[in-house]
Amino acid sequence: MKRALKLTVNDEDYEVLADTHRTLLEVLRDSLGLTGSKEGCGFGACGACTVLLDGKANLACLTLAFSAQGKQITTIEGLAVNGKLHPIQDAAVRYGAIQCGFCTPGWIMSAKALLDEKPKPTELEVKTAISGNLCRCTGYVKIIESIIAASEGK
Amino acid sequence: MKLPRIDYLEAKTLPEACALLAQGDVLACAGGTDLVPSMKHRVKAPRAVVNLKAIGGLDYITYSEKDGLRIGALATLRDLQNNKSVQQKYPALVQSAAMVGTIQLQNMGTVAGNLCLDTRCYYYNQSSFWRSARPACYKAGGEVCHVVKRSDHCWACYSGDTAPAFMVLGAKVKVVGSKGERVIALKQLYSGDGQKPIALAADELVAEIQVPARAAGSGSGYTKLRIRKAIDFPLMGAAVWMQLEGKAGVVKDIRVALTAADSAPIEVPGAAKSIQGKPYSEENLAEVMEASYKKARPVDCVIGGSPPYRKKMARVFVKRAANLAYQQAQAK
Amino acid sequence: MDYAVLGKRTPKIDGVAKATGSARFSRDMILPRMLYGWILRSPYAHARILNIDTSRAAALPGVKAVITGRDTAGVKFGVFRETRDQYALPIDIVRYIGDEVAAVAAVDEDAAQEALELINVDYEVLPAVFDPLEAMRLGAPLVHEGVDRNISAHVLIQFGDIEEGFREADHVREDHFETANISHSTMEPYAATASYDPSGYLDVWVPNQGPFMRRRALSNTLKLPLDNVRIHKVHIGGAFGGRSEMMSCEFCASLLSMKTGRPVQIAYTREETFTCTRQKHPFIVDIKTGMKWDGTLTARQYRVIADGGAYLNTGPITISDSFAIALASYRFAHVRYEASRIYTNKGVRGAMKGQGSQQLRFAEDSQLDMMANDLGLDPIEIRLKNAVEPNEMLLNKSRVTSCGLKETIRESAAAMKWEKPSQKTTRDGRGKGAGISAMISGFSMGIRTSSSSFIKFNEDGQITLLSGTVDNGQGNETMVAIIAAEELGIPVEDIRVVNADTTLTPQDPGSYSMAATFVSGNAARLAAADAKRQLLEIAAEKLEANPADLDIRDKRIFVKGSPGKGIGLKDVVWAGLASGRPVLGKGHYQPDLAFMDTVHGKIEGQVTGAYTFGATVAEVEVDRETGRVDVTKVAAAHDCGRAINRMAVEGQIDGSVVIGQGQVFSEEMRWDGGQCLNASYTSYGLATALETPQVLPIIVESDDPNGPFGAKEAAETINIAIVPSLANAVFHAVGVRIQSLPISPEKVLGALESCKAL
Ligand SMILES: Cc1cc2nc3c(=O)[nH]c(=O)nc-3n(C[C@H](O)[C@H](O)[C@H](O)COP(=O)(O)OP(=O)(O)OC[C@H]3O[C@@H](n4cnc5c(N)ncnc54)[C@H](O)[C@@H]3O)c2cc1C
Ligand code: FES
Ligand code: FES
């Protein structure tokens, strides 16, 4: 059943007609063209679909699109400002934290939620924050390094 | 994977939500982290879901010496961990919430949703295609159990992390339905039936979780066996509450509960007898560990360890949880 | 040698696109009027399709096309003629739960999925077999008619006189090992977008490890002229060998697009990606080794059984290559290798990181450690004693050129301050110990084609580099850019790489078996050298100098020895354009190799352009009460010839360590008959960030005579080495030897308890 759906994504208001059984991930990708958020499993276990809802890391694949109305949604597309990378994105590139890049948007969102709440996290806090973001390529070593570097303004 | 075509409903109050549930074929969705995967797998395909999170003011956590701890149904596992009173008085709650899945799941998942978690089994938590390759099991509406082959009922495993912690703390839950409300011991929330593990009517909801104020000299702890340090459901989880008295730290009372040990979170009965009046030590705990081992009856329905191994681990994890509980109990 | 760009820490040229979410993967190709496809799969492990009625599905509103095997040209696919045993859409028989039966295209995924339920299939269920040992028994059900005892491939390879070798030995051991059924688990689920234009051209975006191989398979099976099929460059979310072969996904998307005249996308679920693409072969290895008192190896005999699943395709490579590579680690004169790959009614097994090497090396290097222990020899010494050396000719007449094996062993041991194996106990009572393993890898590049590369200088002095090389995440695009930049004396930022597009870019072998750096890298270097020659010639006229006296650095061409006398690169390019001599470089590289016939186990001659080496020393802590193992620290030394990009090599090392760790301790696809019980990330145990140990990456540069700037390979070796070194570390920590993977807590605890019982 299609109904009007109002979402606020990256500070922009969207209104689309959507089926009531759509997940937030489907609407972001298929209706709004925000394909940066990925579906790695669709079952809450890989974190590739991580977006922020009111600043907290949530899984878009398990969120009913209609339940996200009225919340501030931030996706990977909303991080760079006027073409300038967010410090976490910048560190990710410079520290070699990206290989295939499929997991990247997801863990960057988790890292952003962490640093917004805790600007100077310990290594264990960084690992915990991204332990719901699977990566098959990097072994996480440089991901962890890059988040710590971003937190230290390096 | 796609969700089935379901309608989306919102309620502004709990009674309103109960009324929607009473219409039939409607399920409650809180964080959705258990319900949405089940619907994607088509093991649940209701006509509609009602989003409880649209109800305002239900995410409170309050503490007073008089009323103890009160947790609104929509408080998240993250809220629980971040609450100062919970941190000081109920470490087992923080420990168990922090061991649920991942940070994202803790941000989304509610305490009530965690308590009402459906039982799990690797023949059940599968896509409709996967399940179509064998006869439907009891839980999926069929007539067999693929785990305990000749069983007349479902053996799916209760795998929630916070339930045993709440249980040893003596928690009660306030249940509201379209016909009114009742307060029951947490234990009564569980039917013990793998097929329908939560003993609530279709139109009933958990409104609040109530934990008695912390007693002097008491402590609690929770820990679980898992293969990885994140994502994994417990293979065996144990919560222990104990109360010490006197200078020597003699055990006055102890309560033990297990998860991933049966189709419900289970209390180990009579745990206290063998250790009451004795100083806390691993030797004096031996019978409690043994009783826990005997009580656990895991079956082969989850990945990570065989039933005998998981059963054996009940001893180890009860000991570890008891050590945690002791730490708090003896701290000044 | 002092390099300007090479060997530094160069950020990936596609890094920003990936960090901002703008990089597009196959499923992000959302095209106008696109339809969504879904595949109907067999719920039976083995069955004959008697009839398929698609009429109700086709009539469902929104459904635009339904196809079955009858709508295809009925062509089987596979890398070798002898191994083509699979239809992209089966016609008569389905051979595993998940085998393809039909496909649907509809206006949205809901309609496509609902249509599947309306397709009526009559099956005749056939007997199935799931265990490879059972499948080999006489009278077992046959997965493919006429294939005796389900042996889909068999090789017997011998050198020397095995009996003589054992007679020479002072100590002989026979041991049994088993490895697990591993999933590649690329984070990107498999997906394809295909768009057929009525003028006859097919455009496809699909994860692949070689667009040219993929184009050939699609053109053969769809009966389209090769040139009409275009595999586009697209971002690829990991491969690890699992994306070597064509899948039903792109075939069905293409055929549905041809039927409907609209673009079609098929995105596999994670479950389909687990069970219906490719998996790693689990091996059963019986290995017998002879050794002298001093640790010198004399003879080795292997018997390998690999569970291959329902189809063959690249299967023979897995069993043959692994042995060809094994020959290049430790020296011995007598060896006998017999391997069988068995059909079973389960999902298909194919290549994964090092083919079958990892499985074989787990057995070899675990046993080597056991023998060292039997004879009281030091695990490091025994490895150094038998290690091959530079310029050594192997038993199969393949020469090892550059070789840093001994350095990798010494340096990884030194980084961990290894003295001798010792068991320690941590303060909380956990057993602690370290284990080592040394490894080689070097893959036959014989069957592959060569690589070519073009370089075009644009009017502003910047260049477009065309290369067929595909980037699965390892950084191949950046690799070719660095090589060209170094050769041309320009910064990497001035290079735009256009790659992995069958219509635009020249032929390339694909990113398998070390071919990327060694072959595509060499081609890029030669193209750059060609362009440089042209530039210098033009500049020589301007500067009135001899081209041989000129060089390029920092975008300037100057006379060697008098850097003041020079001219800007841009001006030279302009001068070329103005005088009808545009600077267009061309490079071509093909290693001079013997053909390795993996199907028949003929592995003699030079089978690879280079061998790479590596060693890892791992430290673990074992919880004696639960059997759970934590990996705390790993030193991994890799002889990659030359690091083109240090950051990328380190990234390969880190990733190899953690993938290996998951494979050793927590990963295993578990089956009940023909059904995988854990085809999901919830219960298939990929390591998380909390499992990551401290990794000490060590780069050893042996400077290969034939590699581009001396470079060889940087992905496989450590992933092979880490597996036995972790198993060895568990032994050194708590004294128990686990001979089957994964080393689960339960197995460790069981072994600890049986020690106590003794
Ligand atoms: C990958 C993954 C890993 C996980 N790991 C763990 C783990 O380690 N430990 C663990 O405990 N859980 C785990 N979970 C399960 C789940 O995330 C948590 O249990 C979570 O707390 C569930 O809460 P929720 O609010 O999301 O529940 P929902 O999905 O919203 O609801 C769960 C069930 O409870 C019912 N329900 C919800 N609220 C109420 C209410 N107020 N009254 C009555 N019924 C209600 C729903 O109808 C539904 O049947 C995991 C989930 C995933 C996807
Ligand atoms: S896609 Fe959402 S967690 Fe994997
Ligand atoms: S970079 Fe490939 S999955 Fe993380």
Image (cartoon, grey):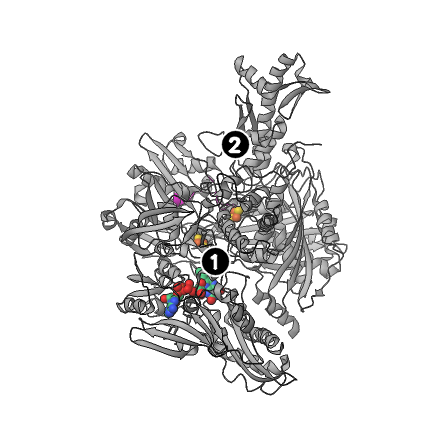
Residue B157 in view (yes/no): no
The amino acid sitting under disc 1 is Gln
* Residue shown at the point (60%, 42%) measured from the top left: C648
Left or right: C658 as drawn, with respect to C47:
right
Q: Secondary structure at mark 1?
A: helix
Q: Is C653 a magenta residue?
A: no
Question: If the image is split into quadrants, where does the C terminus of chain B sit?
Answer: bottom right
* Marks 1 and 2 on same chain: no
Secondary structure type for disc 2: strand
At a point 36% along the width and 78% down the height, the residue shown is B182
Q: Is residue C451 above or below residue A13?
A: above
Q: Which mark is residue B104?
A: 1
Instruction: Assign the magenta stretch its main secondary structure.
Output: loop
What is the x, y in percent for residue C193?
38, 41
Rendered view: C437 above or below C730: above
**Left or right of C686, for residue C219:** left
Q: Quadrant of residue C328?
A: top right
Mark 1 Cα shell of 10 Å, populated few (<14), some (14-19), many (≥20): many
In the rendered view, tell whether residue B43 sits above or below residue B290. above
Q: Where does label 2 land, which residue? A: C497
How many other residues sit within 10 Å of disc 2, few (<14), some (14-19) or many (≥20)? Answer: some
The answer for how far apart the CA atoms under marks 1 and 2 are is: 37 Å
Query: What residue type is disc 2 on?
Result: Val
- Mark 1: C-beta under 8 Å from nearest atom of ligand 2: yes
Boundaries of the magenta span: C233-249
